[in-house]
Amino acid sequence: MPEPAPLPPGIEARLAEIVGTAHLDVGAEIGPDDMADECLSCEPTRPLAVVRPSSTAEVSALLALADREGIPVTARGAGTGLSGGCVPRPDGLVIHFSRMDRILEIDADNFVAIVEPGVQLDQLDEALAPLGFIYPVYPGETSASLGGNVNTNAGGMRAVKYGVTRHNVLGVEAVLASGEIIECGGKPIKNSTGYDLTQLIIGSEGTLAFVTKATLRLQPRPAFAATILAPFDTLDEVTRAVPKVVSSGIAPALLEYIDMATMALMIANGGLDLGIPDDVRAGALAYLVVQLENADEDRLEEDTMRLGESLVELGATDVYVLPPGAAESLIGAREKAFWLAKSAGADDLLDVVVPRASMSVFMERVQKLADESGTRIPGCGHAGDGNVHMAVFQSDPEVRTTVMRRIFEVAIELGGAISGEHGLGKEKRKYFLELESPEKVALMRRIKAAFDPKGILNPGTVL
Ligand SMILES: Cc1cc2nc3c(=O)[nH]c(=O)nc-3n(C[C@H](O)[C@H](O)[C@H](O)COP(=O)(O)OP(=O)(O)OC[C@H]3O[C@@H](n4cnc5c(N)ncnc54)[C@H](O)[C@@H]3O)c2cc1C
């Protein structure tokens, strides 16, 4: 790590005036946690300074100063991103939203919550549970912040039923690079008044504006849930079963696939006891995990029976309705699959999305590319959304880049995209710029310039 770089003269004093010296770190005071996220292939980078504002007014003053001085600024939530979106620039500032962590309002009549960006998912869930609500977007890492979720358009396991962040955020307050504050959307569930700036900002990875409040759509907390685990002899049968389960009318709340290698790691590391006989496990090349929810216990039981029967018709070698403890452990282990891949030495991570009915062809072509290049690509994913998370084990960077580019090309050929939910960050940006249509990239650059004319917001991310 190079020596800490100094701030331009006078800037440290101005930053301290805005946030207070206790909330400003410079040089060697900046710890490793503020230099990286969970991206496997990004280099940690020490910024010039890290500031922790406590209000929208402070964010506005910080951005106005940075814009005047032409200093790049990166927004940081909880740093759990997987694409390097919040990895700082060595010549820039980090605005860390950890102090803006208040739940400002839970409006039970309108089914909305208004939160500051530093609120974490588990913190919000704790506040909503006693009131009988959920905020249904639940990516695997519950320490993630709502500001990060909004800016990556986070998805997670329940997207198959409730949609992703984009479908559950009704409005934002955001600060432009100039320091101007805008309010877009709000509590109403519809709005057809000019361009939808809320939707433009969602998923923009801190490159258009910094989000200082979000209005979230809530749902009733489901009373009853049942989780089915179904082993299959082939991954192909699993991926072919997915569209049929989705169109069966049973409306799963969660529909995940786990391949054999990933399941073996989860069982070995998580001490999972799923009650599956050894001979069934030995023959299973992939699994489907399906969770159903209902407000009525009898209806849930009926749906569970029906689902079990159709899974067997679709080729499952057996069907296990998991007791609540085992279900929770399995879903918890699935959420933590990233850490297993990381500790097993994965070199990179894919988050490709394809139309769900094309998953079978996609997986077949990925396997072929893996075999041809001597790369190991095990995975699991949000099968109900056609969104696969694959760990790439290939130590030769050139071969790895070639294989990953080919996988992205295949996904795009099938009508899919490079990222389903993790975003492009600094990591997948090169593939995006190479493979996306130049006309669309040029339009995105013009949009970026309209929001951020000097290009100070998170440069090097997305574009
Ligand atoms: C074990 C594990 C499991 C995961 N599972 C999932 C999953 O199932 N689904 C999923 O979608 N993701 C998943 N993720 C990825 C990650 O949790 C999400 O991307 C999450 O949305 C990141 O939130 P964060 O607060 O950590 O954001 P950060 O990593 O801090 O930032 C992410 C991006 O948002 C920008 N940003 C942050 N706050 C703001 C703000 N206030 N204004 C403007 N820009 C901002 C940053 O600059 C960066 O570009 C997982 C990660 C881990 C480690």
Image (cartoon, helix red, strand yellow):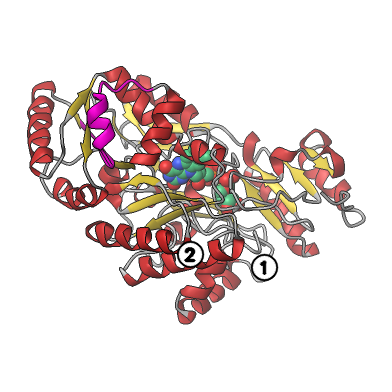
Is 71 situated left or right of 425 in this image? right
Amino acid of disc 1:
Gly
Mark pair 2, 1: CA separation: 32 Å
Total numbered circles: 2
Q: Residues within 10 Å of mark 2 (few under 14, many from 20)?
A: many
Residue drawn at x 44%, y 68% is: 406
Amino acid of disc 2:
Val
Residue drawn at x 35%, y 52% is: 387
Q: Nearer the viewer, residue 298 or 230?
A: 230
Instruction: Find disc 2 in the rendering and name its residue.
Output: 403
Place of residue 331 in the rendered image (x, y in percent of width and height, measured from the top left)? 35, 30
Is 143 situated left or right of 138 in this image? right
Instruction: Find disc 1 in the rendering and name its residue.
Output: 455
Is 359 drawn above or below residue 34 in the view shown? Answer: below
Is 168 situated left or right of 239 in this image? right
For the question of whether residue 75 can be seen, the reply is yes
Residue drawn at x 47%, y 81% is: 439
Local secondary structure at mark 2:
helix
Of all residues, the one furthest to the right in this rendering is 9
Is 258 drawn above or below residue 458 in the view shown? Answer: above
Q: Which mark is residue 21?
A: none
What's the magenta region? 272-292
The question of residue 281 being in magenta is answered with yes
Q: Nearer the viewer, residue 397 or 5?
A: 397
Place of residue 177 in the rendered image (x, y in percent of width and height, measured from the top left)? 65, 61
Of all residues, the one furthest to the bottom in this rendering is 439
Q: Residues within 10 Å of mark 1 (few under 14, many from 20)?
A: many
Closest to the camera, between mark 2 and mark 1, is 2
